[in-house]
Amino acid sequence: MKLGVIGCGKMGSALAGGIITSKLCEPSSVFAYDAYPSASEAFAKSFGATVVNSNAEVATKADVILLCVKPQGFTEMLADIADSPERLIISIAAGIQIKTIETATQERHRVVRVMPNTPSLVGKGAAGYALGSKATAEDATTTQALLDSVGYACQVEETQLDAVTAISGSGPAYIFLMIESLVAAGIEQGLSPEIAHQLAVQTVGGAAKLVEETGESPTTLRENVTSPNGTTFAALESFRESGFTSIVGKAAQAAADRSRELGRA
């Protein structure tokens, strides 16, 4: 595989790093371009990739192209690659619909749209992807393999990517907020900031790992540690009284609604 990366920021680097580490692509077969030369240079230094001089040159040299450009610069970038030979285009740009990419590139390319998340930076990503009108089953297999190199991925319909955004795309921020809140609560209860931080981080990570490795449902695991009238029971009753489940649902709905708005913009 000859891989092109347009946009060498954090997500572009995370995906490329996972792909190279998983030996899906040799460093010498990665071609990168970023509008900011310092970003391209840092990318090349990290992965041994080849920096090229333009978006169009990436599209000429690579078979599979990751579009990791922010939405603000997306239209100009699409114009640069519109006339290149047919390629598999994998876009991670939030809110940019498949049809927009296909139309802007004269329906020349096979397009896959992906919603990844920032834990991809540490190999623990969660992503959903949707196929464009020309994308093939082989393209789906390629995309799955690339995304699996940095975590978990699943194929969905494009209309479901707003829900993916609400759960996993924006989801890490919800967990960060939970960690912040646990740290603050620990400090209020008399712990030092350092100890509160370590306990909160380890607890959140450990709980997720327990769900993953035991195969038990979160409901079962929650019930297993909730003794009648015990400390956990008291805390969970407080959550229920505050409408915790409803709060999370409303937050996800707000994220999904905003994702739809961005898609119509």
Image: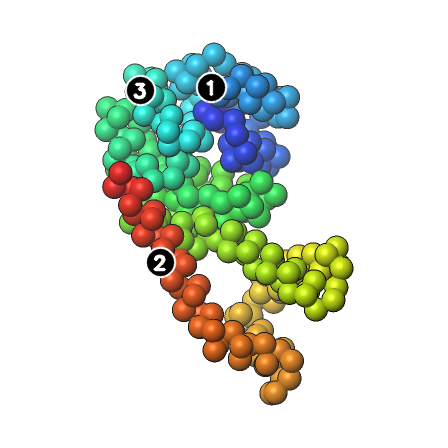
> Residue at coordinates 59% horizontally, 76% vertically from top-left?
235
Mark number for residue 79?
3
- Circle 3 sits in a helix, a strand or a loop, which is it? helix
**Looking at the image, residue 140 lies above or below residue 215:** above
Q: Which residue is mark 1?
A: 35
Q: Which residue is mark 2?
A: 253
Visible residue check, residue 165: yes
Q: Quadrant of residue 227?
A: bottom right
Crowd around label 1: few <14 · some 14–19 · many ≥20 (10 Å)? some
Q: Is residue 69 left or right of residue 10?
A: left
Viewer-side label of 1, 3 = 1
Instruction: Report, in whole angstroms, how far the alpha carbon at label 2 lies from the one at label 1.
Output: 35 Å
**Looking at the image, residue 231 lies above or below residue 260:** below
Instruction: Report, in whole angstroms, how far the alpha carbon at label 3 lies from the one at label 2.
Output: 34 Å
Q: How many marks?
A: 3
**Looking at the image, residue 112 lies above or below residue 188:** above
- Circle 2 sits in a helix, a strand or a loop, which is it? helix
Visible residue check, residue 132: no
> Residue at coordinates 59% horizontally, 81% vertically from top-left?
233
Q: Quadrant of residue 21?
A: top right
- The furthest residue to the bottom: 228
**Looking at the image, residue 117 lies above or below residue 235:** above
Q: Is residue 216 left or right of residue 254?
A: right
> Residue at coordinates 61% horizontally, 67% vertically from top-left?
214
Disc 3 residue type? Answer: Ala
Viewer-side label of 3, 2 = 2
